[in-house]
Image (cartoon, coloured by chain):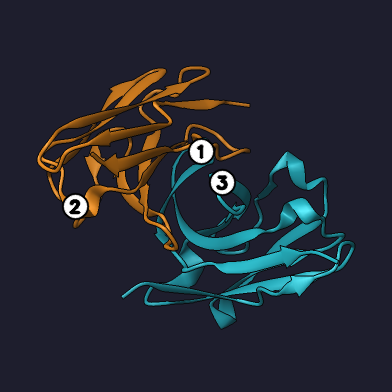
Amino acid sequence: DIQMTQSPSSLSAFVGGRVTITCRASQSISRYLNWYQQKPGKAPKLLIYSASTLQSGVPSRFSGSGSGTDFTLTISSLQPEDFATYYCQQSYSIPPNTFGQGTKLEIK
Amino acid sequence: EVELVEFGGNLVKPGGSLRLSCAASGFTFSSYSMHWVRQAPGKGLEWVSSISDNSGSHIYYADSLQGRFTISRDNGKNSLYLQMDSLRADDTAVYFCARGILVFQGGYYFDYWGQGALVTVSS
């Protein structure tokens, strides 16, 4: 099975700042990597699919990059509503449809 | 507007059974794969099961379920189901249904999610 490892597990940042979250796959997954945002008590929301394609309606301050085994999610100019937990997920093959363990982004 | 609504979450005793439903609207249900993802309290997301579009001829389960869960769909009712048997305490979680988009070799991403149904397994 493909394992997905995110880093860091948590981080804090200022409103207006910039953060980068990393996701590493245990084997090459080409660009089949997706990012989700989840706020407490809510369902996850798709942000980015296929490594860098922004889902419709997602603000352009979110961006994704990477291929093979290493991927990043960058949020520029952090807004108060961006403080949440972020998950990566591989869509290279199933089963299983593996998620990373999550990265909690908190306000500094 | 795409909407997914889960039903059937409840408190159940260990060894018991429960059936979750997910009612879909706002899109052609039969044309999309559907999936269940769960989240134990304070934990991350765990994929549970997937069923392909149309006839649902391709079905997958997480190994951790050990054959205790069964996914199914009724395209005439725009509904997805998860039959859960021999429930254990570690099945306690919020169960989300999600619509899937096929990208490669059977891999999916999930573009719409329901609000989740809480399943609590406890004596």
> For this view, does B107 lie left or right of residue A59?
right
Q: Secondary structure at mark 2?
A: helix
Q: Is residue A65 left or right of residue A1?
A: left
Quarter of the rendering occupied by the C terminus of chain A:
top left
Task: Identify the residue at the far bottom of this view.
Answer: B77
The secondary element bearing badge 1 is classed as loop
Q: Residue A60, position in %: x, y?
A: 12, 45
Q: Give the class, few, some or many, for how many residues have Cα within 10 Å of label 3's Cα (few <14, many ≥20).
A: few
N-terminal of the pair, mark 1 or mark 2, is: 2
Look at mark 1 in the image and give the residue it sits on. Answer: A99
Report the Cα–Cα distance between label 3 and label 2: 23 Å
- Tell me: residue A79, above or below residue A6: below
In this structure image, what is the colour of chain A? orange
Q: Is residue B120 visible?
A: yes
Query: Which hue is chain B drawn in?
Result: cyan
Q: Chain of mark 2?
A: A
Do tags 1 and 3 sit on the same chain? no
- Tell which subunit mark 3 falls on: B
Q: From the viewer's perspective, is residue B89 above or below residue B106? A: below
The residue tagged 2 is A80
Q: Secondary structure at mark 3?
A: loop
Q: Is residue A58 visible?
A: no
Q: Which residue is mark 3?
A: B43
Disc 1 from disc 3: Cα separation: 12 Å
Q: Amino acid at mark 2?
A: Pro
The span from disc 1 to disc 2 (Cα, nearest Å) is 25 Å
Q: Position of residue A11 (x, y in %)?
A: 33, 32
Instruction: Identify the residue shown where x is 62% and y is 52%.
Output: B40
Please tell me how crowded label 2 is: few (under 14), some (14-19), or many (20+) other residues with Cα within 10 Å.
Answer: few
Closest to the camera, between mark 1 and mark 2, is 2
